[in-house]
Image: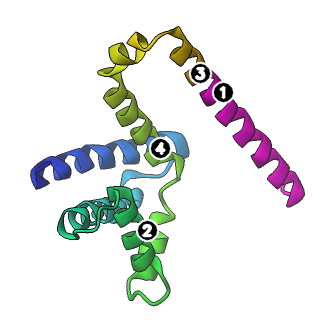
Amino acid sequence: MRVIDWIFTLAITGLGMMTANFIGFDIAFAESLPGVLVLLALALGGAGLAHIIPLKLPTVAYCSILGLLVACPLSPVSEFVISAANKINFTAPLTMVGAFAGMSISNQLRSFVKQGWKMVLITVFVMTGTFVFSLLIAQFMLQLTNVI
């Protein structure tokens, strides 16, 4: 993927995150812009590192490592990064990630269905089980810590 394609995709993602942050959490575009720019810069930097460094790690690993380094207390910009990122609600980026995942899966749907009804059934069970067990673990932990 070319750099211009990355920048275009990240710009669309940033607009989507700011829109989701505004609609869902009443945070103004101007208020969420620094946080979105920080997150997008980390994503672009992680993608760049994935191409430069010969170690075969997923791009998300480079983004995570870069984010940890930029936000750690030793970093001179950590206060800005943390305060800017705190303005972005965690579920706002998830909206865009879910949309992109859905679009990428949609053109492989025929090959998925060709694998047969057993694979579809297993997928439904795995997704349902993941959701239910995540819910049970969250409920247990919230009750254990007296949050609810």
Is 63 magenta? The answer is no
The answer for how far apart the CA atoms under marks 3 and 4 are is 25 Å
Q: Is residue 93 depicted above or below 31 in this figure? A: above
Element under disc 4:
helix
Residue under label 4, please give it.
94
Examine the rendering and report whether any part of residue 59 can be seen.
Answer: yes
Contact, mark 3 vs mark 1 (Cβ under 8 Å): no
Where does the image place residue 32, in percent across and percent down from the top left? 41, 57
Q: Tag 3: residue type? A: Ile
Q: Tag 4: residue type? A: Leu
Contact, mark 1 vs mark 4 (Cβ under 8 Å): no
Q: Is residue 19 depicted above or below 64 in this figure? A: above
Image quadrant of residue 77? bottom left
Q: Nearer the viewer, residue 86 or 141?
A: 141
Q: Nearer the viewer, mark 2 or mark 1?
A: 1
Is 130 magenta? The answer is yes
Q: How is the image coloured?
A: rainbow
The answer for how far apart the CA atoms under marks 3 and 1 are is 10 Å
Which SS type dominates the magenta stretch?
Answer: helix
* Numbered range of the magenta stretch: 125-148
Where does the image place residue 9, in percent across and percent down from the top left? 23, 45
Q: Nearer the viewer, residue 48 or 33?
A: 48
Element under disc 1:
helix
- Which residue occupies 48% across, 82% down? 72
Residue under label 2, please give it.
84
Q: Nearer the viewer, mark 2 or mark 4?
A: 4
Residue under label 3, please give it.
122
Q: Is residue 36 left or right of residue 7?
A: right
Contact, mark 2 vs mark 1 (Cβ under 8 Å): no
Residue 128 numbered mark, or none: 1
Q: Earlier in the sequence, mark 2 or mark 4?
A: 2
Q: Is residue 16 left or right of residue 122?
A: left
